[in-house]
Amino acid sequence: MRRARDPFFWGLFSGGGMLTALLLPALFLVTAITAPMGWFGMTGYEEWATLAGHPLTRAGLLLVAFLAFFHAAHRFRYTLYDGLQLYHLDALISIVTYGVAAVLTVLAAALLILVV
Amino acid sequence: MKSQARIPTGRISDPGYPRASNPEYTRHHPRWYRRRMPIFWWLRKLAYTKFILRELTSQPVMYVTLFLLGKMWVLSRGPEAYETFIQWLSHPALLAFHALVLAGLLFHTVTWLNLTPKALVLRVAGRKIPGWAIVGAHYGAWLGLSGAIFWILAGR
């Protein structure tokens, strides 16, 4: 399934898979479900904005975003490759999936460094 | 005498090479025989369906990452923007969708952590650490980190 000839992308896939597996369920549950519902503490704007502005939050999220994008790109590449059997389009699929991941990483960096 | 000269020697210098030395030779590459597979081959067996669903968890991972970045952007836009964002998030349709996304994330986590013994073979003093210990350690890390995230983001 996964090729040993892409150790670089496989490394990003692997690291991103681990980081997202460990962190994303809790992060998403709190930010997308319990906070809007007003469950538990920390529902106000001020608290969230203070946390969002902290350099550690931004650096951490940038690392998560970088690895998550390349993890998803690598996995989706092989979903198309195996699932839809697009063997002849492998080069094009690789360029598009990793390309999207790279562009999104740059945008995430711009957002987290310049805007937030 | 003349017919004897036509017996192929297999040398490149033979006039009919390579056809003369190899009767199976054709100028063009033969077409491989491939069985045609239907596009939904993975619905035939539960194991295949689970495999494809696991591979498709890349999409919830993608969505949630963009969501977190989006929330950061909204927070930078001030209290009013955040209020509107929260109202959107409380809409039942979006909450239902997000519950589905969360289910996809959990499927990613469980399948990923269950595979850790295959990716990680550890030896201590020449003995292989059993798979259940490696899985258990990873689930412990997941629990601990999730607890820490809850404590920081929702605990106060």
Image: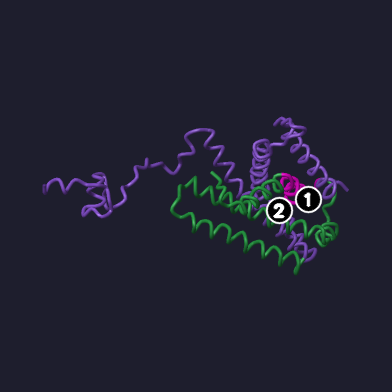
Instruction: Chain letter for mark 2, please.
Output: B
Q: Where does the image place residue B121, in percent across and percent down from the top left?
A: 69, 37
- Tell me where the magenta segment starts and ends, as one range: A22-39
Q: Where does the image place residue B149, in percent across and percent down from the top left?
A: 81, 47
Instruction: Chain letter for mark 1, please.
Output: A
Which residue occupies 47% across, 34% down? B44
Q: Amino acid at mark 2?
A: Leu
In-image side of B19 versus A94 (left or right)? left
Question: Which quarter of the picture shows residue B34?
Answer: top left
Q: Are marks 2 and 1 in contact (CB under 8 Å)?
A: yes
Q: What whole-number distance in Å separates the C-alpha atoms at marks 2 and 1?
A: 9 Å
What secondary structure is the stretch in magenta mostly built from?
helix
Which residue occupies 68% across, 54% down? A67
In-image side of B110 versus B37 (left or right)? right
- In the displayed structure, A54 sits above or below B144; it is below
Image disc number at residue B89: 2
Q: Which of the two residues, B138 or B62, is positioned nearer the viewer here?
A: B138
Residue named by callout 1? A35
Q: Which of the two residues, B32 or A51, is positioned nearer the viewer here?
A: B32
Chain that is coloured purple in the picture:
B
Q: Magenta includes A28? A: yes
What's the colour of chain A in the image? Answer: green
Which residue occupies 73% across, 60% down? B84
Name the residue furthest bottom.
Answer: A114
Which residue occupies 76% across, 60% down? B82
Q: Secondary structure at mark 1?
A: helix
